[in-house]
Amino acid sequence: MLQELRSDKLMISPRRDWADMKVLFREEATTAVLGFIESTEVGKRLQNGMNKDDLWDIDRLDQNNGEDAMDIGNGRDE
């Protein structure tokens, strides 16, 4: 979103303060802000039978494809 805002010559401060709210609500920022909301699914309503924990995509956390994870604490494979 920030890249798209910059390409539209709209700047957000590094502090992310209340002055930035005015930028985000400008008509020129609409496409970038709506794209952010859509891609992050902020405010997505739960469908019937859905648990809010289902939205965390826990199944995506297994990056080892079922292999045992390395114990990072001591640097050895466990």
Image (tube, rainbow, N blue to C red):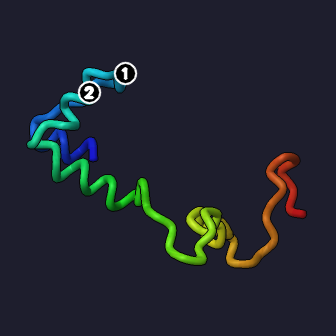
- Expressed as whole percent of the image width and height from the top left, the position of residue 62 reads 68, 70
Whole-number angstrom distance, CA of label 2 to CA of label 1: 9 Å
3 versus 64 height, above or below: above
Asked whether disc 2 touches disc 1, contact meaning CB atoms under 8 Å apart, the reply is yes
> On the image, which quarter does residue 29 sit in?
top left
**SS at badge 1:** loop
> Label 2 belongs to which residue?
20
**SS at badge 2:** helix
Question: For the residue marked with disc 2, what is the amino acid?
Answer: Asp
Q: Residue at x 60, y 77 (%)?
A: 49
**Front position in the image: 50 or 1:** 50
- Expressed as whole percent of the image width and height from the top left, the position of residue 43 reads 42, 55
Left or right for 5, reference 13: left
Question: For the residue marked with disc 1, what is the amino acid?
Answer: Arg
52 versus 8 height, above or below: below
- Expressed as whole percent of the image width and height from the top left, the position of residue 48 reads 54, 76
- Expressed as whole percent of the image width and height from the top left, the position of residue 9 reads 10, 36
> Label 1 belongs to which residue?
15
Left or right for 74, reference 35: right
Crowd around label 1: few <14 · some 14–19 · many ≥20 (10 Å):
few
> On the image, which quarter does residue 70 sit in?
bottom right
